[in-house]
Amino acid sequence: EIVMTQSPPTLSVSPGERASLSCRASQSVRFNLAWYQQKPGQAPRLLIYDASSRAAGIPDRFSGSGSGTEFTLTISSLQSEDLAVYYCHQYNKGPPWTFGQGTKVEIK
Amino acid sequence: EVHLVESGGGVVRPGGSLRLSCAASGFTFDASGMSWVRQAPGKGLEWVSRINWNGGITQYADSVKGRFTISRDNAKNSLYLHMNSLTAEDTAFYFCASEDGDLPGLYYFNYWGQGTLVTVSS
């Protein structure tokens, strides 16, 4: 099983500032990495797939980068509506297809 | 617009059974693989099971293998999860999710339902 590790567990960022979230895989997942946003009380929503491709309707302040075992989700200018937990997900090898434990983004 | 609507959750005693349903609309359901993903209250996401477009391939997490069965009815645009021998560790929100991807076997979850809560308690 591929273990996905996200850091930090919680990130506190001021509005307008940049937020960088990290995801590390226990073995290479190539570019087969997605990011999801889950707002309180809501279902997850796809943000990024194939490590760096934005899903339809996702604002361009969200970007993904990385390959192999190291990935980053960047929110270039944090907005208040970006308060959420963000999960990475590897779909390179499974079952099981695995998620990170999440990074909670708080508004400072 | 894509809609995935889960139903069938509720409170069940340990050892009991439950069947979850997911009604799909707004996309070509019979061409899409589907998965169930669960989330214990306050916890992270855990993939549970997936089924390919025609039901010919089903896969399960070790934690549910032999107890859960995934199935689909393409004529009804519906996905199901039959859950047996439930334990407290199965208490979670259960989301159905549609799959997308350019290459076989490499699928991310492009749409998610709102989830249905399963509580296993005596």
Image (cartoon, coloured by chain):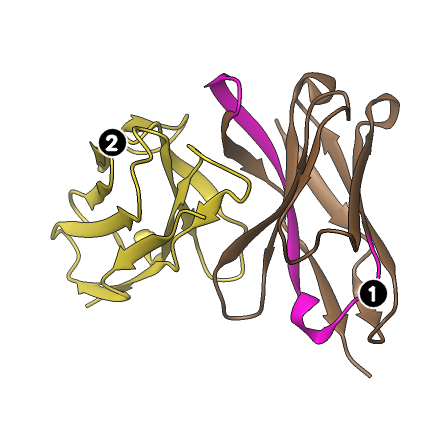
Callouts 1 and 2 in the same chain: no
Q: Is residue A84 above or below residue B52?
A: below
List x then y, in percent, for residue B38: 61, 55
Q: Is residue B94 magenta?
A: yes
Q: Which chain is brown?
A: B
| SS class, disc 2 | loop
Q: Position of residue B76 (x, y in %)?
A: 86, 27
Please tell me which residue lies in front, B95 or A100: A100
Q: Which residue is mark 2?
A: A60
* Mark 1–mark 2 distance (CA, rounded to whole Å): 46 Å
Magenta residues?
B83-105
Horizontally, residue A101 falls left or right of residue B121, namely left
Q: Position of residue A4 (x, y in %)?
A: 35, 51
The residue lying toward the viewer, choosing from A30 and B11, is A30
Q: Dividing the image into 4 quarters, which one contains the C terminus of chain B?
A: bottom right
* Protein chain holding label 1: B
Q: Tell me how many marks there are.
A: 2
For the point 11% across and 53% down, the residue is A17
Element marked by disc 1:
loop
What color does chain A have in the rendering?
A: yellow
Cβ–Cβ below 8 Å for labels 1 and 2?
no
Residue count near mark 1 (Cα–Cα under 10 Å), binned few <14, some 14–19, many ≥20: some
Question: Mark 2 falls within which chain?
Answer: A
**Amino acid at dot 1:** Ser
The three-letter code of the residue at mark 2 reads Asp
Q: Quadrant of the N terminus of chain B?
A: top right
Give the x, y percent position of residue B10.
Answer: 81, 66
Indicate left or right for A55 with B64 as reference.
left
The quadrant where residue A61 appears:
top left
Residue B50: name its quadrant.
top right
Q: Which residue is mark 1?
A: B85
Image point 80% across, 27% down: which residue? B77
